[in-house]
Image (cartoon, rainbow, N blue to C red):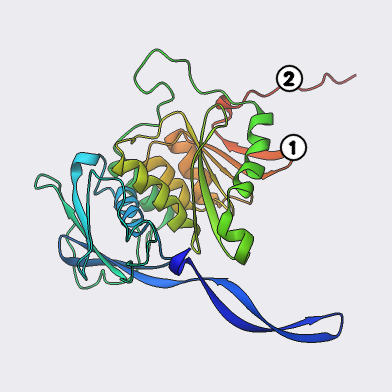
Amino acid sequence: MGRVTERRKVIRIRDGAVSTRPDTLVAEEPLEIRLNGKPLAITMRTPGDDFALAAGFLVSEGVLAEQKDLRNIVYCAGATYGGTSRSSEAESGGGSNTYNVVDVKTAPDVAVPDITLERNVYTTSSCGLCGKASLDAVRTTARWPIDDTHGGDAPPVRLDPELLAALPDRLRAAQRVFDRTGGLHAAALFSEDGELLDVREDVGRHNAVDKLVGRALQSGALPLSRTILLVSGRASFELAQKAVMAGVPVLAAVSAPSSLAVDLAVESGLTLVGFLRGASMNVYAGEDRIALRAAASQG
């Protein structure tokens, strides 16, 4: 796993018995994201998939939308990654990824935000804004409508609740690092048939989503129409924003959504499902994509 996990000594107490043993912990380190050489943001993350994380972050910020928007990404210490290649030894955990600063270089025709000294800490377009301003910001920067048909003749996405109910177990089975540490969030991308397309883990749930979206950008798969994004925790406004910016029609979470996440889902046409546990779930928006059975008639 490389730098994804670290070992620490722990004093273990079980039923009054005390012992000392090594424990596996998830790694957490800062990542500075630079845009065309200028510092843009800092996030705490689990090392690995750093280039995808940076690319996905810039999708959610409205800077990148297509593979051609990305020229390349480099570690400032020298390791490089072309925007169209798939991976490198450093990125895949081969042992040479020891850097915490990446520089994203965009294509010449990509409009970039005005980077000022005030924007030198971790931020997103939702930070410091009121609810209405946050919704307006996503509305004006989203590149794609939430489109079930992807511009073709396919019928709209329609999901059985039973399919949704099966997804958390599939996500959990794919969480390799969580099994060792118990300390990671996860995000997974599924097809409308329930096929697991990709899964990423990170100490931050927003980072896990950025890694998914960044990998999709790098492979030319955006927008992520006709997919389901599942997150292991709650559904915040930030995660709903990332889903909308990537063109995802369905966001599901095992925990609760926030009120602003629901507002964004309603406004954008996103289907938002919360408390997805076992056969139970709450549908907060976009219920037309869920194949709801008719309620039992009352006597």
62 above or below 195? below
User: Crowdedness of circle 1 by 10 Å Cα count: few (<14), some, many (20+)?
Assistant: few
Amino acid type at image mark 2: Ala
Amino acid type at image mark 1: Ala
Q: Residue furthest right?
A: 299
Disc ID at residue 294: 2
Q: Mark 2 or 1, which is nearer the eye?
A: 1
Under tag 2, what secondary structure?
Answer: loop
**What is the quadrant of the C terminus in the image?**
top right
Residue at point 63% right, 49% down?
172
Sooner in the amino-acid sequence: mark 2 or mark 1: 1
193 above or below 201? above
Disc ID at residue 279: 1
33 above or below 66? below
Q: State the residue in front, 55 or 296.
A: 55
Residue at point 37% right, 59% down?
129
Q: Is residue 153 visible?
A: yes
Q: Position of residue 272 (x, y in %)?
A: 55, 39
- Residues at marks 2 and 1, CA–CA distance in whole angstroms: 17 Å
Residue at point 36% right, 52% down?
133
